[in-house]
Image (cartoon, helix red, strand yellow):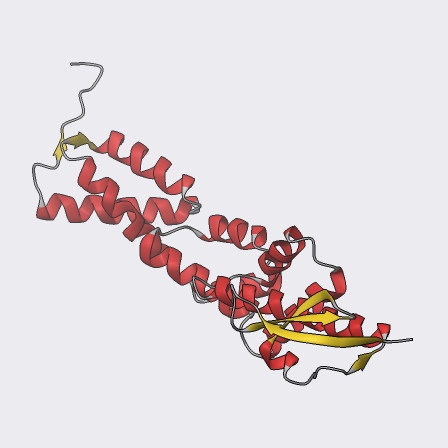
């Protein structure tokens, strides 16, 4: 035996949602778009009630993720973790992800490109560090390698070193090599790139700022 819709009331705190009353008692909420399909006096079976509630849960979770994505892109793995933390059922999570992917809101290739470009612009990292970060975001190795295939590690290392160069004025070349080298290695750059960038920086600084380096005292002195 089904249950009868006895009232459909717009919720006071959210005018885009409707409270559904069955047999005189509040049963569940629905979006106004879904509730418009219902009417007072309509009989709903238990299966229909369950389907409406499940559909509403998916819709609300979808809207929450869209609001989250308005701040910055997220990987599908990040979205899955976010929804799991909301204690949603696995089928609900997968349906939300399917909708997001279908509509282009969730795209791991686009996310990986965004992540690398953002790092390049604001805080350059080497390929080793970027691979680690992207793996932490749940990006597959194939997508990571595709994203990094045109990555200019030398340019990124050069730009990453600029802030340190401004801080190290009046320093010996050996100390300069040690400090810049250690900094770039921590940022995930490989040794050959680090060495090439340091050589380039020293050459440029000697030409542009002759007093940048101080003589390094020897043991004989």
Q: Quadrant of residue 187?
A: top left
* The one of 175 and 104 positioned closer to us in this rendering: 104
Which residue: 74% across, 74% down? 52
Q: Position of residue 29 (x, y in %)?
A: 66, 68
Q: Is residue 186 above or below residue 51?
A: above
Name of the residue lying farthest toward the top: 220
Q: Is residue 123 above or below residue 63?
A: above
Q: Is residue 7 above or below residue 65?
A: below
Is residue 152 visible in the rendered image? The answer is no
* The one of 171 and 101 positioned closer to us in this rendering: 101
Q: Quadrant of residue 141?
A: bottom right
Locate residue 181 relative to residue 221 in the image: left or right.
Answer: right
Q: Position of residue 193 (x, y in %)?
A: 38, 49
Q: Is residue 108 above or below residue 124?
A: below
**Quadrant holding the C terminus:** top left
Which residue: 32% across, 49% down? 196
Locate residue 117 relative to residue 162 in the image: left or right.
Answer: right
Q: Position of residue 201 (x, y in %)?
A: 22, 47
* The one of 58 and 132 positioned closer to us in this rendering: 58
Locate residue 86 relative to residue 210 in the image: left or right.
Answer: right
Locate residue 217 relative to residue 114 in the image: left or right.
Answer: left
Q: Position of residue 219 (x, y in %)?
A: 22, 15
* The one of 35 and 201 positioned closer to us in this rendering: 35
**Quadrant holding the N terminus:** bottom right
Which residue: 54% across, 76% down? 104
Which residue: 65% across, 75% down? 8
Q: Quadrant of residue 119?
A: bottom left
Is residue 20 visible in the rendered image? The answer is yes
Total numbered circles: 0
């Amino acid at each position: 035996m089904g249950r009868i819709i006895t009232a459909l009331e717009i919720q006071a705190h959210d005018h885009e949602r409707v409270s559904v009353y069955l047999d005189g008692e509040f049963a569940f909420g629905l979006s106004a778009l879904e509730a418009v399909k219902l009417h007072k006096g309509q009989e709903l079976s238990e299966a229909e009630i369950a389907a409406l509630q499940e559909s509403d849960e998916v819709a609300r979770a979808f809207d929450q993720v869209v609001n989250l994505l308005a701040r910055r892109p997220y990987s599908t793995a990040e979205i899955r973790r976010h929804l799991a933390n909301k204690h949603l059922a696995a089928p609900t999570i997968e349906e939300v992800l399917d909708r997001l992917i279908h509509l282009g809101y969730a795209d791991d290739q686009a996310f990986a490109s965004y992540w690398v470009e953002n790092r390049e612009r604001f805080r350059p990292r080497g390929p080793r560090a970027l691979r680690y970060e992207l793996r932490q975001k749940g990006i597959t190795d194939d997508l990571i390698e595709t994203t990094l295939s045109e990555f200019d590690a030398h340019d990124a290392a050069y730009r990453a070193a600029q802030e340190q160069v401004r801080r190290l004025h009046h320093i010996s070349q050996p100390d300069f090599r040690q400090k810049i080298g250690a900094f770039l290695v921590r940022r995930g750059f490989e040794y050959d790139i680090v060495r090439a960038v340091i050589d380039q920086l020293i050459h440029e600084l000697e030409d542009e700022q002759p007093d940048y380096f101080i003589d390094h005292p020897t043991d004989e002195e």
